[in-house]
Image (cartoon, rainbow, N blue to C red):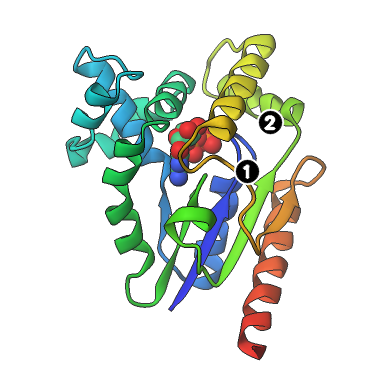
Amino acid sequence: MTIIAVDGPAASGKGTIARALACHYGLPCLDTGMLYRAVGLSVLKAGGDPDQEADALGACDFDESMLDDPALRSEAVGSLASRVSVHQSVRQSLIKRQRDFATQPGGAILDGRDIGTVIAPDADAKIFVTASVHIRAQRRYSDALAHGGHPDMDSLIADIQARDTRDMSRDHAPLRTADGADLLDTSDLSIEAAIQRAIALVDAQLEGRRKV
Ligand code: CDP
């Protein structure tokens, strides 16, 4: 069984890298941010307050079909996800599902914020993907343009900074580089180069584990 943990801040490229690794190693992949996004969107739909722990916890038994809702991908729902994810009980209620996915026969790849630190601290390989705030905002800008949106660079930068601050400073499972993780800064890398680098880092970690 091979478990690969991919963590990092918003728009760092971790989702793209996790999917490419899944394809390369033939493993199933879970974007754990979608679970927090589904909780965030459910709170909104129920008219609740994402900052209230009881409201956020009540939204954790969201309908499975919500995971296919395209609205989950929006920047607004990303912020809601970041707000509901500070609550300990919300994180706790999503742990089993993530651990079950990680420990399925053959293994899996999960991407998120706390995969290498909390969900799968014994993962066979761990990568922390990052990039400068400006580059990450630029990527969100290009994505939004490509999808017919009218993005504003200053508000994208402010949103990313606010999300980084909230994710890194929360009490429970804050975003940080896990012990044993390799750092992959994608600021100056093309998607293809970032993927090749990620594969090289994972190969080296898997090889290192085989030797011990
Ligand atoms: O795609 P992007 O990196 O913008 O965000 P995401 O991975 O979909 O995660 C949305 C929010 O959910 C993050 O800002 C985190 O606050 C939260 N999250 C978390 O707390 N733990 C995870 N394992 C995944 C996401």
The Cα–Cα distance between marks 1 and 2, rounded to whole angstroms, is 8 Å
- Along the viewing direction, whichever of 119 and 185 lies nearer the viewer: 119
Q: How many numbered discs sit on the rendered protein?
A: 2
- Along the viewing direction, whichever of 105 and 57 lies nearer the viewer: 57
Residue indicated by mark 1: 13
Q: Position of residue 183 (x, y in %)?
A: 72, 54
Left or right of residue 95, residue 54 in this image: left
Q: Secondary structure at mark 2?
A: helix
Q: In the picture, which quadrant includes the C terminus?
A: bottom right
Q: In the picture, which quadrant includes the N terminus?
A: bottom left
Q: Neighbour class for label 1 at 10 Å: few (<14), some, many (≥20)? A: many
Outermost residue on the front side: it is 171
Residue 160 visible in the current orientation: yes
Left or right of residue 18, residue 119 in this image: left
Above or below 125: residue 116: above
Residue indicated by mark 2: 136
Return the disc, 1 or 2, that comes first in the chain's sequence. Answer: 1
Residue at the image point whose x is 67% and y is 24% from the top: 137
Would you say the residues marked 1 and 2 are in contact, meaning their CB atoms lie under 8 Å apart?
no
Q: Residue type at mark 1: give it.
A: Gly
Quadrant of the image occupied by residue 74: top left
Above or below 121: residue 132: above
Q: Position of residue 28 (x, y in %)?
A: 40, 63
Quadrant of the image occupied by residue 43: top left
Q: Secondary structure at mark 1?
A: loop
Q: Residue type at mark 2: give it.
A: Arg
Residue at the image point whose x is 65% and y is 60% from the top: 181
Above or below 130: residue 119: below
- Along the viewing direction, whichever of 193 and 104 lies nearer the viewer: 104
